[in-house]
Amino acid sequence: MNRLKLLFFLALMIFVSARYTSVGRGYVVGFNNFVLSGYLHARNVVIHKINEHFYQQKIILKLREENKKLEKSALLSIAFAGKLNDVLKDNNISIYKPNVKRIQAISYSKLNNYNKIWLDFKDFNKSRIYGLLYQGYGVGIVVDQDSHPEGLLLKDPNAIFSVYVGKDKIPGVLQGNTNDILVKYIPQWMNPKIGDEVVTSGLDDIFFQGVRVGKIVKVIEEESSKTAIVKPYINLTVPSYLHVITKK
């Protein structure tokens, strides 16, 4: 009897194996895939977290090094300003103490116009025009628009301020024309060249002298003056924080 039961059991196992092998294998493969998928996902999460951790460490170290350099530059600037003001005092000239203020860009003023931005500028005086800076470069001006501070970036036609061109400090007026940035009203007898640097002159009470703006890429001869096209050092797309010159 026991032999018959054993033979029956073996026959049943062979039948089930022959009949349902593919189905059983499908379940096994499915289970294995589920386990492997879970494992790989978990591994990728762990690797990502580890990489993120080390990346953050690298960024922190890099920022620390940059901060050291900036601290050194700030100390040197303070020392230079102190020496400069000592000289000014000795010559009965007012102390030079320009001030800048960090402000936030809120949004573009108009749709499809990336040259005008609303600014969060608490101490804005609507009777003034302010110089606008980004990473130390001149990028536009701040004006009053319906009693709100509006930033006009370099390509805006109403972004106008006084500049010097090149080592000879050739005078001109920087103005946007939507597509380009121009230095206009350059005297006909002066010779600006391609590659000359454009800096603010400080003659218009908007910027102080020497803020870098860009370089000349083309000079246009006109009847009574010359016009130069400028390639700016900074092309703003979606600015977040900028600086304004509150005092020259």
Image (cartoon, rainbow, N blue to C red):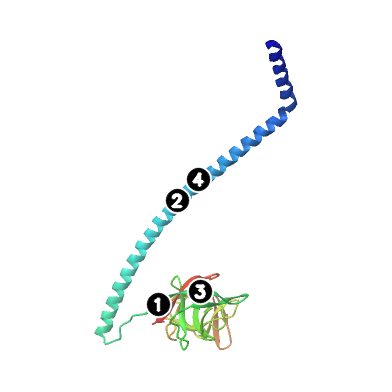
Question: Could you tell me which residue is drawn at 47 percent across and 85 percent down?
Answer: 129
Residue 49 percent across, percent down from the top left: 48, 49
Residue 242 percent across, percent down from the top left: 46, 73
Which residue is more in the foreground, 128 or 3?
3
Residue sitting farthest toward the front: 1
Which residue is more in the foreground, 118 or 237?
118
Q: Closer to the N terminus: mark 1 or mark 4? A: 4
Q: Are marks 4 and 2 in contact (CB under 8 Å)?
A: no
The part of the image, by quadrant, that contains residue 96 is bottom left
Instruction: Measure the C-alpha gap from mark 2 to mark 3.
Output: 31 Å
Q: Closer to the N terminus: mark 2 or mark 3? A: 2
For badge 3, the amino acid type reads Ala
* Camera-side mark, 1 or 4: 4
Residue placed under numbered mark 4 in the picture: 47
Which numbered circle lies on residue 100?
A: 1
Residue placed under numbered mark 3 in the picture: 105
Question: Could you tell me which residue is drawn at 40 percent across and 59 percent down?
Answer: 63
Element on which disc 3 rests = strand
Q: Closer to the N terminus: mark 4 or mark 2? A: 4
Neighbourhood count class around disc 2 (C-alpha, 10 Å): few under 14, some 14–19, many 20 upward: few
Instruction: Measure the C-alpha gap from mark 4 to mark 3.
Output: 37 Å
Residue 83 percent across, percent down from the top left: 27, 76
Element on which disc 1 rests = strand
Residue sitting farthest toward the left: 90
* Camera-side mark, 3 or 1: 3
For badge 1, the amino acid type reads Val
Element on which disc 4 rests = helix
Which numbered circle lies on residue 53?
A: 2
Instruction: Measure the C-alpha gap from mark 1 to mark 4.
Output: 44 Å
The part of the image, by quadrant, that contains residue 135 is bottom left
Neighbourhood count class around disc 1 (C-alpha, 10 Å): few under 14, some 14–19, many 20 upward: some
